[in-house]
Image (tube, rainbow, N blue to C red):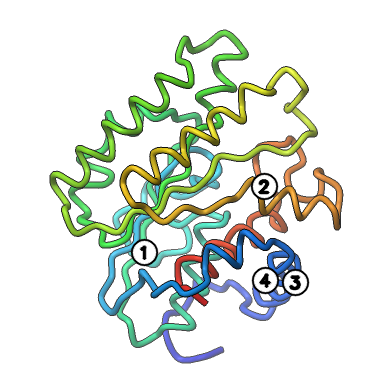
């Protein structure tokens, strides 16, 4: 294992085995390569990197350890952890501080309710947000009255608030995604695609770095079935999370 942070007993060989396998799949997406091509890395020496979102980002993170940067328990067991582990081992001289403040079940307005504590006070240099699946899922099950317009408006307000306080922050807007299996049925469409369009629109408005996760998974299911990547169609398996991390890193690091 290279010099640098110790990751609470996580076996780097196992991590690398998963990421190297999924790297091949990530290279299938022309859009993934386009997102990274000719880009300069958003990650600089001394950067504070914050992952925000819902349960996909949360991934079982420890609330008790949330204040600790670069802590595996605090980073959870999903794509945020895979991405952080890679950055911290491959860039040991960058003195990075990586946090995960995703909360399962959250929609955009719930991010806003905790934004000062879980974002602004951390003063991230790079802020990555993946949000949207609950905004439609909870609407479909009758527990939320929001629409695509609500999602877009709330998202815009959140980012305006963010750049007002943190004018130098580098924004990363991740495309919400689903796979057609498990909880995801035909009734999700075409409405879900409108959320994807809204996220891209917001990304363009704020000149954010856009991560096209849906396009990535659309390529991935040509190699393995949807259940391989996310059994319930929403929450990634370890394979899905590792693929997301590889894709995120390829784009954000510009390589």
Q: Nearer the viewer, residue 45 or 29?
A: 29
- Which residue, given by chain and number where applicable, does mark 2 sit on? 236
- Which residue, given by chain and number where applicable, does mark 3 sit on? 24
Q: Quadrant of residue 172?
A: bottom left
C-alpha gap between disc 1 and disc 4: 19 Å
C-alpha gap between disc 3 and disc 1: 26 Å
Q: Which of the two labelled residues, at mark 4 and mark 2, occupies the earlier sequence position?
A: 4
Count of all numbered marks drawn on residues in the image: 4
Callout 2: few (<14), some (14-19), or many (20+) C-alpha neighbours within 10 Å? many
Helix or strand or loop: what does disc 2 sit on? loop
Q: Quadrant of the N terminus?
A: bottom right
C-alpha gap between disc 1 and disc 2: 21 Å
Label 3 vs label 1, nearer the camera: 3
In this rendering, the answer to whether 102 lies above or below 75 is above
Contact (CB < 8 A) between labels 1 and 4? no
Question: Going by the image, does 218 lie left or right of 152?
Answer: right
Q: Nearer the viewer, residue 188 or 183?
A: 188
Contact (CB < 8 A) between labels 4 and 2? no
Q: Quadrant of residue 71?
A: bottom left
C-alpha gap between disc 2 and disc 3: 18 Å
Give the label on residue 19, or none: 4
Whole-percent x and y of residue 25?
A: 75, 65
Q: Which of the two labelled residues, at mark 2 and mark 3, occupies the earlier sequence position?
A: 3
């Amino acid at each position: 294992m290279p010099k640098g942070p110790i990751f609470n007993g996580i076996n780097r060989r196992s991590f690398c085995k998963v990421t190297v396998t999924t790297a091949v799949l990530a290279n299938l997406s022309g859009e993934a390569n386009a997102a990274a091509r000719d880009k300069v890395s958003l990650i600089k020496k001394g950067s504070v990197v914050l992952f925000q979102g819902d349960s996909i980002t949360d991934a079982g993170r420890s609330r008790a350890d949330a204040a600790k940067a670069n802590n595996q328990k605090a980073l959870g067991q999903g794509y945020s952890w895979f991405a952080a582990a890679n950055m911290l081992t491959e860039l040991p001289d960058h003195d990075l501080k990586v946090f995960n403040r995703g909360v399962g079940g959250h929609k955009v307005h719930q991010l806003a309710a905790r934004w000062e504590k879980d974002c602004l006070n951390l003063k991230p240099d790079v802020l990555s947000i993946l949000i949207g699946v609950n905004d439609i899922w909870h609407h479909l099950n009758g527990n939320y009255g929001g629409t695509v317009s609500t999602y877009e408006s709330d998202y815009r307000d959140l980012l305006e608030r963010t750049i007002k306080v943190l004018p130098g922050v580098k924004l990363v807007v991740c495309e919400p995604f689903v796979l057609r299996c498990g909880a995801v049925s035909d009734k999700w469409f075409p409405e879900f695609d409108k959320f994807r369009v809204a996220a891209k629109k917001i990304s363009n408005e704020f000149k954010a770095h856009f991560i096209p996760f849906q396009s990535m998974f659309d390529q991935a299911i040509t190699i393995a079935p949807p259940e391989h990547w996310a059994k319930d169609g929403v929450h990634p398996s370890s394979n899905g999370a590792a693929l997301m991390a590889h894709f995120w890193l390829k784009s954000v690091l510009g390589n």
